[in-house]
Image (cartoon, rainbow, N blue to C red):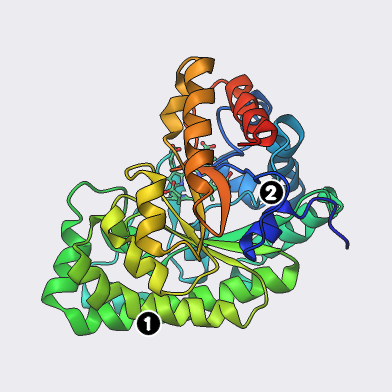
Amino acid sequence: MVLENTSFLDACRGRRPARTPIWMMRQAGRYLPEYREIRSKVSFLELTKTPELCAEVTLQPVDRLDVDAAILFSDILVVFDAMGVDVEFNPAPEIARPVRTAADVARLRWGDPREDVGYVLDAVRACKRALAGRVPLIGFCGAPFTTLSYLVEGKGSREYQHIKGLMFSEPALFHQLMASMTELLCTYLGGQVEAGVDALQVFDSWAGALAPVDYREHVLPHMRRLVDHVRGLGVPLIVFVRGNASLLRQSAELGADVIGVDWTIELERAIAEVGSTRVVQGNLDPQILLGPEALIERRARDVLDAGRAARAHIFNLGHGISRFTDPGKARLLVDVVHGYSG
Ligand code: CP3
């Protein structure tokens, strides 16, 4: 199907569209009353397993905010269905039996996400039908390190003692698990592309907890394998590492099409780090949307001005939108970005 709005994909490919494209991480979610309305009737997991509802929720921010890309409604942790691991969302994710011992590892199943998480691929097809070519659809997964961390920690963590304990004390087992996870995620992303997504984003939300030397030694080789695999799939890839701007240069080395930037670094510095021939995505602090309109406009323009130094720039928040955001302010941000002509 021919897309009506290609500004996001053009920017991914290094061309500068007439207006800077914008989408927001977690743009479908609890800050939207129409999302809360659906969630009052179904649980989060039921929602992710009902393709027609996923499509409805995926389109909510496209309709309300006029963003230039849709992101599939799902979660990075549903892939555990391919591994025989149960996760609950209350709403934060929690795994009843985290993977800690050799016996836990032996129990893991390394299934085929195209079958075991087939409902996500059905959701991709439902989203593409519902979008009818209005804007591109972004598929996603968690990066191997972030996904494995959830498996080992069992829930969000402050100190990452279990995953780092494994990494430092049993590096061979850590690498073996990372390699298996990477293959599973490669298959999963391939399935999403076959089902119709137009671009992919890999979320490494937890890699920021690592020292640069450990990212290089323990994570980068696996990310390289993932990025090389996606390069063969024919859709652009965004790699987003959160919480440690000193990893930007390494994440740029991977050669993904777009480098996600969180809000902890000035965008001009981030561009200087990765090089002005690269495409960047980011990086307004999501909590700025809790502030007054004049501040939102000013800070958005600062990010847009900085983005001009890059080969191309996709406007985004530096992390997911807060559930406390007024949807009117999110819409204001989109209008400011679209109306900008620096
Ligand atoms: O971006 C989108 O709009 C698409 C959907 C999406 C969700 N989660 C929906 C969701 C995406 C891309 C994610 C990614 C995700 N999930 C990440 C990576 C990005 C990041 O935030 O760093 C991570 C770490 C997760 C794991 C996860 N899922 C957490 C930590 C939580 C709870 C956080 C919270 O907001 O309370 C979830 C649940 C979740 N995933 C919700 C949504 C809309 C809230 C669940 C609800 O409706 O009750």
Q: Name the quadrant of the C terminus.
A: top right
Q: Name the quadrant of the N terminus.
A: bottom right
Q: Is residue 157 left or right of residue 39?
A: left
Quadrant for residue 179, please give it: bottom left
Q: Closest to the observer: 152 or 200?
A: 200
On residue 106, which mark appears?
Answer: none
Marked residue nearer the N-terminal end (2 or 1): 2
Q: Is residue 254 positioned above or below 337 on the image?
A: below
The x and y percentages for residue 98 are: 30, 60
Q: Is residue 52 positioned above or below 33 on the image?
A: below
Residue 267 appears in the rendering: yes
- 10 Å crowding of disc 2: few (<14), some (14-19), many (20+): many
Mark 2 → mark 1, Cα distance in angstroms:
31 Å
Q: Residue at x 68, y 71 (%)?
A: 193
- 10 Å crowding of disc 1: few (<14), some (14-19), many (20+): some
Q: Closest to the observer: 145 or 342?
A: 342
Q: Is residue 225 positioned above or below 155 on the image?
A: below
Identify residue type, mark 2: Ala
Nearer the observer: mark 2 or 1; the answer is 2
The x and y percentages for residue 326 are: 56, 20
On residue 69, which mark appears?
Answer: 2
In terms of secondary structure, where does tag 1 sit?
A: helix
Q: Residue at x 28, y 81 (%)?
A: 175
Q: Closest to the observer: 192 or 314?
A: 314
The x and y percentages for residue 69 are: 69, 49
Identify residue type, mark 1: Ala
Q: Which residue is mark 1?
A: 179
In terms of secondary structure, where does tag 2 sit?
A: loop
